[in-house]
Image (cartoon, rainbow, N blue to C red):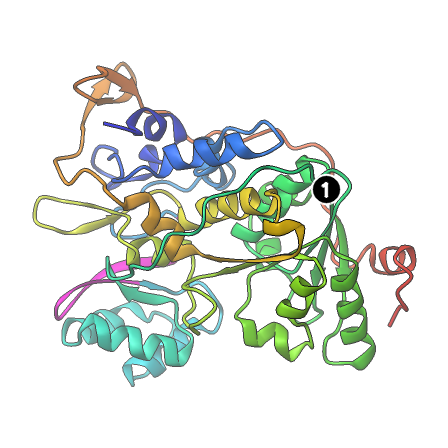
Amino acid sequence: MSGQVEWAASGVVALTGRPDGPPLAPPGRGALTARELAETLPVPVDGPRLLAERAAFTGHRRGGPVSAGGSCRLLPTADGWAAVSCARPDDPALLGAMIGAETGADPWPGVAAWLRVHTGDELAERAELLGVAAGPVGRTRRPRVPAPLSPRPVEGLLVVDFSALWAGPLCAHLLGLAGARVVKVETPSRPDGARRGSPDFYRLLHAGHRSVVLDPGTAPGRDAMAALVDAADIVVEASRPRALARFGLDADAAVAAGTTWVSITAYGRDTDRVGFGDDVAAASGLVCREPDGTPLFCGDAIADPLTGLTAAALAASAPPGGGGVLWDVAMSDVVAGTLDGADPGPPPVTVRHGDGWALDTATGGLVPIAEPVRRETTGTAPESGRDTAEVLRELGIACP
């Protein structure tokens, strides 16, 4: 029963299950892991509640085989199940290319028909080739991400954050709460897609940070990026290694110079597979199962906050040997690690409890199921590029 109290209090259970059915407790120890990670940070945060707090801003609810945010679906394949995301503007066209057919504005009927006669391995191969966020459910198993080492103070350290969406920004946000100076870096052609989401949630993660916009398509822009990395104590990025290499940024060189480099990927730096929080979690096995084996999503893109917490705890660890370190933080590894040794027995029963629901944990009695909770936001998030000239001037970097 380890971790069920944390699951119930996290808000994740309320986001798990079919919309017309009871909430369900996810397998594994993800919420307990979140609590343990948060306890290593030099700032007081409720780790389990971080896992569901985006839904408190967006109003997302449980959708069963459709993700809480609506952009990912669990669909049957010829040999099991798959999670497929359609979150980006180009994704309908990419999904059409994957199945070899025109999909129009709604790709789901064609994708569902194609999956029914193709295996999960065939899906994974095509998805990686085309950059589609999709994979067979429960197939990904890699080594667990290293545990955080002895904590170190991060107050005053310069964090240069190249990441976007949720996992990387959550890492930078937690470091910022602990006193680090956070500079968010975007490019003119690819601003953080989270800017199009909930403005209040974006403000929560970015309040107090400074925003720099640089164009890596120009030599001055690339030089300024490299100079920012040279000045950084911690770099947070969530790109495939080849993407930053095209900008002239070398993680190995930065680490050799003493930088802590946090690399967040879907499936590791040694693969070109892409993924988002919902499809990666499902591909890594974090799903609930109905009696007939049908998988259902757990929480809201839960691989993202789990990974953000893990990345922050590692970034706030003392580097081995006192020098630089490259933390390879794959979302799939983070999720799979919470399922190691998970109890294969039946999940706890969900019962009505007053006006809400509770988990009947047998040994711990009834534990009320909490709804997602939002933290209060203080300060404002900077407009894109607001601080470019000021930050570069302070660091003695030529402004492009």
Residue drawn at 21 percent across, 70 percent down: 120
Query: The residue under label 1 is which amino acid type?
Result: Ala
Quadrant (top left/top right/bottom left/bottom right) for the C terminus:
bottom right
Residue at 63% in and 43% down? 173
Residue 72 included in the magenta stretch of the image:
yes
310 in the magenta segment: no
Is 353 above or below relative to 310?
above
- Horizontal and vertical percent position of residue 353: 25, 16
Q: Residue 253: x, y in percent?
A: 67, 69
- Front-lying residue, 15 or 235: 235
Q: Nearer the viewer, residue 251 or 129?
A: 251
- The residue singled out by tag 1 in the image is 180
Q: Left or right: 122 with respect to 156? A: left
Query: In the rendered structure, which segment of residues is drawn in magenta?
Result: 69-83
- Give the residue furthest to the bottom: 100
Q: With respect to residue 147, does 133 lie above or below? A: below
